[in-house]
Image: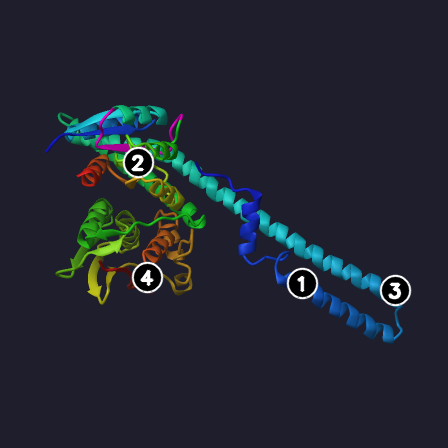
Amino acid sequence: MIQIQNDLDIKKQARSLGVSFWQAPSFLFIVLGLLIIFVMTAVFLASRESISLQQLVVAEFFVVVVILSIGNLLIEMLEKMIAANKSKSEFISIISHQLKTPLTGISWDVELFNSKYKEGLTKKQLEILDNIESSNIAISKMVNDLLDVARIDQNNFFTQKDEIDITEVIQKVVDKNAILSKNNRVKINFLVDDNMPKIIGDKKKTEVVLDNIVSNAVKYNRDGGEVLIRARKNGQEAVITVKDTGMGINEIDQDMIFNKFFRSENASSQDVSGTGLGLYIAKNIIEKSGGKIWFHSEEGKGTKFYFTLPLA
Amino acid sequence: MDRKKILIVEDDSRLRDILKEFFQADEFDVLTASNGEDCIEIMQAEKLDGVLLDIILPKKDGYAVLKEVKADDRTKNVPIILLTNLGGLNDIEKALELGATTYLVKGDYQAQEIVRKVKEVLR
């Protein structure tokens, strides 16, 4: 199971963040520096005979002690912050994991039902089953996102190296967004280069990346708008683009769009639901797979997302 | 093709039953276990083509089972497919190091996809 990190690990982490105060030479330098300042000012001030040398020694000793204790205090605070952050990530990850077993049960049950026991159901009954399924997909997606973020934060994020047929992935994502795009009256088209080679990446997670981008492109589109997904070969890599005809991302928000929990002004002011995790996760997946992700956006005109992945 | 005989080790009875039904529908002979000790016992007694093994299990967990069966001449050549909801980098690395053939994160797949993946691995 997931282990709660002990104090030692936290200290190690604190050190790796650059606070190797007590072991490293930097500590020596600081003490040495303080001593030199101490002696020089003492000599200087004593030579002017305004204060006695004794008083100076006491005062400067006090200063050194204060500086060292402030340093110590800062390190302790930092250690506590790291510990708090860690237990938060661990909490999310344990909870999400406990949620995943029953969610998997619902998903497989619905699948079993659909494949074997559907005969003779009324239209209304089928509709209810569909609703159960789409609610379950929505919750699972949220749990998976939280789990992914916790793993990214704990440096425990894993991406596989599969050979991917990108057309298959795109088709899957288009199907997944069919209901959403119909409700929003947005048309999704896609175009893949002839003889497109296989791509190296994590199949499931690449699907997540494309789904996050495409569902945004549908949600933040205009009524009657369009989404165009393209995949082409460029040298040793594949470039996948998703272009929408939506409201665009305003310039102030553009720098923060890949940040965790960030939702742009345009997104949150419109009545569109979202957690602000999709693009943060997408960026981590693509970069872990050896690719890059970026975008161009013009307010009022639309946004075009790009990501690359190595070819097989 | 001969029918393949597999062992599904899963402590959640619902997941176990659903998986069993899907694999049986695909012409597999299916044995089941709900904890690590039973898993080892069955593996020693039966000739199996593969094992689907959960990690968080009562009695012995999946890692302990892997260690034990990989050290035993009777069982070391049976392919073991980890099927769990632990999907962190260190979980996967540990399982592969201990000799698991492959690793599937339960919640990421439909049951039918799992059947397909297992077939690929055991072919």
Q: Give the letter of the chain under mark 2.
A: B
Q: Marks 2 and 3: in contact by CB < 8 Å?
A: no
Q: Position of residue A130 (x, y in %)?
A: 23, 34
Q: Give the letter of the chain under mark 3.
A: A
Element type at marker 4? loop
Q: Give the letter of the chain under mark 1.
A: A
Residue found 45% across the figure and 49% down from its top: A153
Q: Give the letter of the chain under mark 4.
A: A
Element type at marker 2? strand
Q: Main secondary structure of the magenta part?
A: loop
* Closer to the eye: label 3 or 4: 3
Distance of label 2 from label 4 (alpha carbons)? 31 Å
The residue to which callout 1 is attached is: A28
The residue to which callout 3 is attached is: A54
Marks 1 and 4 on same chain? yes
Crowding around mark 3 (Cα neighbors within 10 Å: few <14, some 14 to 19, many 20+) is few
Amino acid type indicated by mark 1: Leu
Distance of label 2 from label 1 (alpha carbons)? 52 Å
Choose the circle earlier in sequence order: 1 or 4: 1
Marker disc for residue B83: 2
Viewed as shown, does residue A85 lie left or right of B80?
A: right
Marks 2 and 4 on same chain? no
**Colour setup of the view:** rainbow
Q: Quadrant of residue B87?
A: top left
| Residues shaded magenta | B46-59
Amino acid type indicated by mark 4: Lys
Residue A187 appears in the picture as rendered: yes
